[in-house]
Image (cartoon, rainbow, N blue to C red):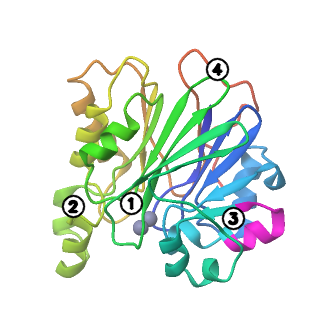
Amino acid sequence: MIVRVLGSGSKGNAVLLEAGGTRVLIDAGFSPKGMEKRLAVMEVPPASIEAVIVTHEHSDHVSGVVACSRRWGWRILASAGTCTGSASLARASVERISTTGNVTIGELDLATIRLSHDANEPMAVVATSRETGARAGIVYDLGVFTEAVRRAVHGVDILMIEANHDVAMLRRGPYPPVLQRRIASRHGHLSNDAAAAAASACVHPGLSHVVLAHLSQNNNTPKIALETVRAALARTDFAGELTAASQGRVTGPFTPKGMPYRGPAQLQLAL
Ligand SMILES: [Zn+2]
Ligand SMILES: [Zn+2]
């Protein structure tokens, strides 16, 4: 299992999962040009990707999906609610999936989990390598990390979890009160404190990587997010690595402990 983040934040999200030669994207929130540029940094030919799973209809997750699919032949999988909420998906050929189901694509088993977020049918994805059993959870754009979500991601080797905002920065920041309330609500985004609690609740001996996702550029910094989550993880038995995904750079590859990455060596290259 290899996880690579093409970028994460309110200007676009895309996460590449790979196992046994199968490549699947979670979201494609960049233009085809932007996707191509990021994939080139990873030395991944776009046409080698089999499918894209769309977590929800917000433009930072869906904006490149249909154009990329047309250009490179990707299958598109999304819930009925996500299709209804997106003008481009509503007109495209989409395989409908449930927000609480399972789908197999090549060497990847993918389980979907319903999230609480201000979209029609937002979901998280837990991917399992059919070959090695390694698992990765991609959990962002959620207002609350529920017990059901925790159970679904329990035991993953790689956890990508949203750390959207620092509560004090959000309160002091540039957003009007109504938007602040929406972000902080149960249908908004996870704070650094909530991400810290979520990551701590997922600690087990096999947890190799915690990757912080969807950091706000106005109400957070990588330093504050990392410090907050690191302080919480220090009170647990976590022995893995903590990383903050970036909006403008690719991040990864992340692999489970004992399964080193043997591909091209590029990391953290600026775009
Ligand atoms: Zn988003
Ligand atoms: Zn969203």
Inter-mark Cα distance, 4 to 1: 29 Å
Nearer the observer, disc 2 or disc 1? 1
Magenta region: 66-75
Horizontal side of 184 relative to 30 (left or right) equals left
Amino acid bearing label 1: Asp
Amino acid bearing label 3: Gly
* Residue 176 in sight in this render: no
Which dot marks residue 141? 1
Name the quadrant containing residue 34. Answer: bottom right
Residue 74 included in the magenta stretch of the image: yes
Residue pictured at 72% horizontal, 44% vertical: 23
Residue 219 drawn at (x, y percent): 29, 62
Residue 59 drawn at (x, y percent): 52, 74
Query: In the rendered image, which quarter contains the C terminus?
Result: bottom right
Give the mark, 4 or 1, whose residue is nearer the N terminus. 1
Q: Is mark 1 within 8 Å of ligand 2?
A: yes
The crowd level at tag 3 (other Cα within 10 Å; few <14, some 14-19, many 20+) is some
Horizontal side of 264 relative to 214 (left or right) equals right
Which dot marks residue 169? 2
Report which residue position mark 3 lands on. 34
**Labels 3 and 1 touching (C-beta < 8 A):** no
Horizontal side of 51 relative to 28 (left or right) equals right
